[in-house]
Amino acid sequence: MIWAIVVVAGLAAAASALGTGVGLRVARERAILDHPNPRSSHDAPTPTGAGIPVVTVIVFAWLLIWALTSAGADAGFTYPVALVCLLAAILAAVSWYNDLKGLAPVARLLVQVAVVLIGISTLSAHGRIFQGALPYGLDVAVTAYLWLWFVNLTNFMDGIDGITGVEAGTIGIGIAILAPLILAAGLAQGIFISSSLVLYATVFAAAAIGFLFWNWQPAKIFLGDVGSVPLGFLGGWLLLEVAGSGLWAVALLLPLYYLADATITLLRRVAKREAILEAHRSHYYQTAARAVGSHAPVTLAILALNIALIALAIVSAAQPENAVAALIAGAVLTVGLLWYFAQRKEGTGSGET
């Protein structure tokens, strides 16, 4: 299995990097550019749309894995994964239209709600994500809300060079490393999670890392909504598979920086009675990037935190009795980094996103 994981990772990363390179050339030729706006951390129009090759690589690879396992032991899991891919493609199409033409926020939200509600049926533990602690209807409703929030916060947090590639990459790597424990935990709960989870997580991480080749500061191309929205959906599916196994600490630890920065920033803006639907640059990572005049140090700090969070996730999964302690430790580290970012004095440089 290890050689298969290495091959899959290499192919997915290479395909994502090559596809993004082609996308960059097309975006330049057709002047498909992301122009600076009140939310932007970049100063000049920059090619966008890299989400098309990145998401295409993930969807194609997941479907290929599905096809290769459909006749084997994972036959019962193949239809849900195919449906997940279709739903991600729908989100990508709608988001691409929004990138090019603009789409009313309400219309985008309605599509996302519909996709998430359908997507819940694909989860191995659908209706039991909270292990029976909630009635079926409430379990589905809370799961849908959490998934929808993760889709949107992934979009909100895609604001400086390399940040989403790092976040998606580390989430995927963490799940791939922990896949055997996740499957075992699910089985103990009576939840049968596909043994191909390790490959799905590997592809997710590798495609994000391939994109980083072009998106590291100074970024040559951006994901666009066509990338960040479906990546949030696919990443949310992976994390909900983990949560459904009963390893909630793992599902919270791996994306903890994104969850904390986006949620706390939203609550701060609500407390200040700001118009929360308006574009802004008040996320902690954006404040830090403006302060140092560069994106790379901020992204590297988040990467370092994420590596620590992966280590804590491994501890929580291997030693369930220490899961709460690991989660508390992760929260302390994350809040510490947010505090550090908030203390930076704003400088004059902003770099490029």
Image (cartoon, rainbow, N blue to C red):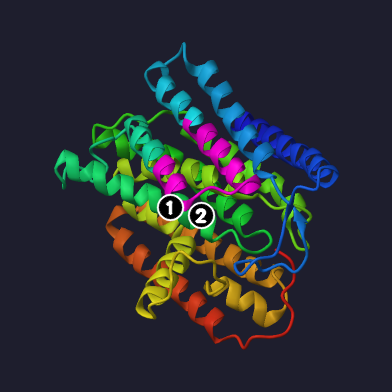
For the N terminus, give its image quadrant. Answer: top right
Q: Position of residue 347 (x, y in %)?
A: 69, 85
**Above or below — where is 121 with respect to 49?**
above
The residue that appears at 62% across and 60% down in the rendered structure is: 163
For the C terminus, give its image quadrant. Answer: bottom right
Q: Is residue 73 visible?
A: yes
Left or right position of 104 against 299: left
**Above or below — where is 348 with respect to 64?**
below
Left or right position of 287 against 113: right
Q: Position of residue 158 (x, y in %)?
A: 59, 58
Residue at the spot of label 2: 154
Q: Is residue 247 visible?
A: no
Q: Position of residue 236 (x, y in %)?
A: 43, 45
Q: Closer to the camera, 91 or 158? A: 91
Query: In the structure shown, which secondary structural element does the residue marked by tag 2 occupy?
Result: helix
Q: Is residue 89 magenta?
A: yes
Residue 121's disc number: none
Which residues are drawn in magenta? 87-112
**Above or below — where is 231 with respect to 75?**
below
Q: Is residue 166 magenta?
A: no
Do callouts 2 and 1 mark residues in contact (Cβ within 8 Å)?
Answer: yes
- Please name the predominant secondary structure of the magenta segment in the image: helix
The residue that appears at 78% across and 65% down in the rendered structure is: 44
Mark 2 surroundings within 10 Å by alpha-carbon count, few (fewer than 14), some (14 through 19), many (20 or more): many
Residue at the spot of label 1: 150
Q: Position of residue 223 (x, y in %)?
A: 66, 49
Mark 1 surroundings within 10 Å by alpha-carbon count, few (fewer than 14), some (14 through 19), many (20 or more): many
The three-letter code of the residue at mark 2 reads Thr
Q: CA distance from mark 2 to mark 1?
A: 6 Å
